[in-house]
Image: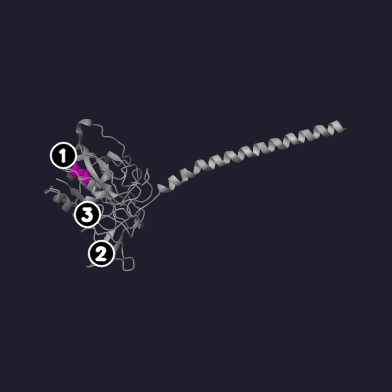
């Protein structure tokens, strides 16, 4: 009987020891998992900053002034260019979308679709630069165009200062801010709809002229034929558009009277090539300063849809020549 008690006690002690060893192992294992996850969560948080112009998420985080994968914006904080969805918007959004009336190919939402005839491709050898600040897409686009002509500018800020740059916060009480048709509005690197915005075509063309490109001009009447003609002639084109459209356009007042229309997601890119015939191009090649996309192919109808998505804002182009 005493032996049986000893055997029972020994078995009980073995079971208890095994339980504590297993619990300790699990505890240490869980700690390891927690320590592994913490830096991942921190990294994810750092890549989710958003600004007024590039909203939603882009593929890379917005880590600017470093020329590393980012997501920037001006503007721009996150590029989801809606490239895989139809750009027509519903009637209740208040946004005006005009589909190209040119006789282009049937709509195809895949921007990776390549032209079938390599002999009909024209690409300008334009250096690629990422925008260095959250809101410097227009400056980066002009910087690339100038580099094509051998004009070197090291910093987006140098170009922004030529746009006209006296950064200040939006007066939210009176809804007053500066005029992007005359200067860069807000701070070049600020995140938020009351701190940083960007610039429209007129200050950009004046800046191009100041760098010696005296034949540069801007236009709001943009066709695929115009773009192809200028590219064929060796002139890169800065084109306004958007990264995403999630809200309706809004306005603010100007100190001297009048108002400005803006929208969250406004963005500028550089058109550097086209495929097909000048009179009926199949698509265009684009340098996007936001997301490291160089010579990205856009079918003609997709590009023109984007140009006329928000009347008065996205239908802007500067031909640098």
Measuring from the top left, give residue 79's x and y in whole percent: 34, 47
Check if mark 1's residue and mark 2's residue have beta carbons within 8 Å: no
Q: Is residue 294 visible?
A: yes
Measuring from the top left, give residue 276's x and y in whole percent: 21, 36
Q: Secondary structure at mark 2?
A: strand
Measuring from the top left, give residue 118's x and y in whole percent: 22, 31
- Residue under circle 1? 232
Q: Secondary structure at mark 3?
A: helix
- Residue under circle 3? 161
- When the figure is inspected, residue 301 is found, relative to residue 246, above or below; the finding is above
Measuring from the top left, give residue 62's x and y in whole percent: 36, 47
Classify mark 3: residues with Cα within 10 Å, few (<14), some (14-19) or many (20+). some
Label at residue 259 = 2
Label at residue 294 = none
Check if mark 1's residue and mark 3's residue have beta carbons within 8 Å: no
Measure the C-alpha gap from mark 1 to mark 3. 31 Å
Q: Which residues are magenta?
A: 143-148
* Residue closest to the eye, 37 or 99: 37
Classify mark 1: residues with Cα within 10 Å, few (<14), some (14-19) or many (20+). some
- When the figure is inspected, residue 179 is found, relative to residue 65, above or below; the finding is below
Q: Residue at x 16, y 53 (%)?
A: 206
- When the figure is inspected, residue 167 is found, relative to residue 83, above or below; the finding is below
Depth-wise, is mark 3 or mark 2 nearer the camera? Answer: 3
Depth-wise, is mark 1 or mark 3 nearer the camera? Answer: 3
Viewport quadrant of the C terminus = top left
Check if mark 3's residue and mark 2's residue have beta carbons within 8 Å: no
- When the figure is inspected, residue 242 is found, relative to residue 284, above or below; the finding is below
- Asked whether 145 falls inside the magenta stretch, the response is yes
- Asked whether 262 falls inside the magenta stretch, the response is no
Classify mark 2: residues with Cα within 10 Å, few (<14), some (14-19) or many (20+). some
Report the number of numbered marks. 3
Q: Upstream in the sequence, badge 1 or badge 2?
A: 1
């Amino acid at each position: 009987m005493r032996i049986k008690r000893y055997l029972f006690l020994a078995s009980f002690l073995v079971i208890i020891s095994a339980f504590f060893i297993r619990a300790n192992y699990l505890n240490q294992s869980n700690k390891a998992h927690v320590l592994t996850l913490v830096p991942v969560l921190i990294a994810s948080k750092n890549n989710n900053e958003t600004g007024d112009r590039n909203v939603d998420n882009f593929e890379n985080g917005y880590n600017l002034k470093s020329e590393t994968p980012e997501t920037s914006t001006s503007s721009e904080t996150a590029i989801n260019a809606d490239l895989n969805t139809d750009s027509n918007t519903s009637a209740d959004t208040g946004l005006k979308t005009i589909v190209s009336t040119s006789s282009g190919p049937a709509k195809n939402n895949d921007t990776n679709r390549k032209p079938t005839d390599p002999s009909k491709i024209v690409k300008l050898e334009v250096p690629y630069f990422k925008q260095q600040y959250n809101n410097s897409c227009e400056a980066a686009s002009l910087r690339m165009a100038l580099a094509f002509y051998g004009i070197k500018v090291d910093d987006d800020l140098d170009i922004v200062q030529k746009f006209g740059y006296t950064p200040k916060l939006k007066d939210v009480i009176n809804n007053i801010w500066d005029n992007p048709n005359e200067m860069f509005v807000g701070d070049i690197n600020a995140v938020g709809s009351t701190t940083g915005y960007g610039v429209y075509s007129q200050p950009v063309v004046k800046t191009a002229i100041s760098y010696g490109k005296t034949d540069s001009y801007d236009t709001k009447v943009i066709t695929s034929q115009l773009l192809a003609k200028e590219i064929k002639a060796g002139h890169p084109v800065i084109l306004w558009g958007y990264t995403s459209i999630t809200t309706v356009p809004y306005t603010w007042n100007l100190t001297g009277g009048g108002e400005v229309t803006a929208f969250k997601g406004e963005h500028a890119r550089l058109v550097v090539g086209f495929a097909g015939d000048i009179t009926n191009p199949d698509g265009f090649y684009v340098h996007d300063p936001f997301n490291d996309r160089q010579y990205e192919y856009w079918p003609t109808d997709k590009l023109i849809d984007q140009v006329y998505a928000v009347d008065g804002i996205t239908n802007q182009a500067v031909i640098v020549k």
